[in-house]
Amino acid sequence: MQDEMSKASAWLKPDPYIIAILLMVVLASLLPVRGEAAIWFSWLTKAAIALLFFLHGARLPREHVIAGLVHWRLHLLVLGSTFLLFPLLGLGLVQLPTWLLPEQLAAGVLYLCLLPSTVQSSIAFTSQARGNVAAAVVAASTSNLIGVVLTPLLVGLFLHTTTGGISLKAIQDVAVQILLPFTVGQLVRPWVQGWVQRHAKLVSYTDRGSILMVVYGAFSAAVVGGLWKQVSALELTVLLVICVVLLAVVLVVTRQAARLMKFSKEDEIVVVFCGSKKGLATGVPMASILFPAATVGFIVLPVMLFHQIQLMACAVIAQRYGARPGDQAETRSAS
């Protein structure tokens, strides 16, 4: 019993990274960066974003992308959840009355639904749940590759009424700050992959540090623009409930879809974890490029809330999957 209680407390323990992100929100609320300093900080952040996606490109083995073609039914289901089911649910949620969910927060909820899946946590939870880790690597990586191109297009298509539209310059900025560094990372991977592997901690610090910089800059601009004067406690509560319900619906749908398609338990786990996640590491930097600085804080607030909720919920689900009886090497479904 004590062992189970200790495991439960570990599931619910806040992620130090999430705590650091929340501290950036507090710091931005108390000491937002302004004026000339904000301009220099913005350029520094753009450089950090470019470095982040260069490292992502250098880390991702090309064979993982090619391997994605093999198990096509699984990957189509994950992509369908990420870029079809989520957006449809998001379009429904933004119909809530503005007194309950203001337009800027509604835009953030819809933006959340247009993001690609996570990579690290999807793979980690799949491993804990004794799922098909190789398929999870491919599914999550493919989602991110497609999302770099597809998410800005979907944002331009669905958010034009609330954000004023996504300009050609914004698309170009995504290409220059995200797609180009990622492509360069892939091209030079044969020469730098060894260094990247040997300095995994440094890469991780760069990854997380760049996100912290974006969060601080985004919330600084939002605070200067009156973020906390415009978001009430009721609206934050509604946002929290929306994130919980959204995640619950997608978890149920992905699980049932995998079972209807007669996937093995290992592959079901991949669909559930990769198909229900939304990536903070991609979403926050991309928001800083796609949206005006004063609105980015509103946009990323739902993303941050959903990220913490999905970590807590999926930790519990992974433990339950992992505790199932049977041989760990279950038969995988045919592709």
Image (spheres, grey):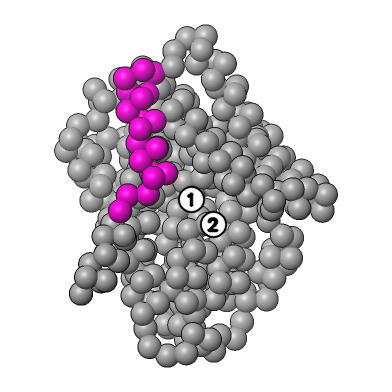
Quarter of the image holding residue 16?
Answer: top left
Q: Pointer 1: what residue?
A: 279
Residue stretch rendered in magenta on the structure: 13-32
Residue sitting at x 83%, y 49%: 191
Can residue 323 be seen here? The reply is: yes
Residue 44 position in % (x across, y down) = 59, 24
Q: Residue furthest left?
A: 234
Secondary element type, mark 1: loop
Residue 218 on image: x %, y %: 44, 28
The answer to the question of whether label 2 and label 1 lie on touching residues, with beta carbons closer than 8 A, is: yes
> Which element type, helix, strand or loop, lies under badge 2?
loop
Q: Is residue 51 magenta?
A: no
In the rendered view, would you say 42 is above or below 180? above
Residue positioned 76% across, 53% down in the render: 194
Q: Is residue 14 magenta?
A: yes
Nearer the observer, 206 or 25: 206
Say which residue label 2 marks: 119
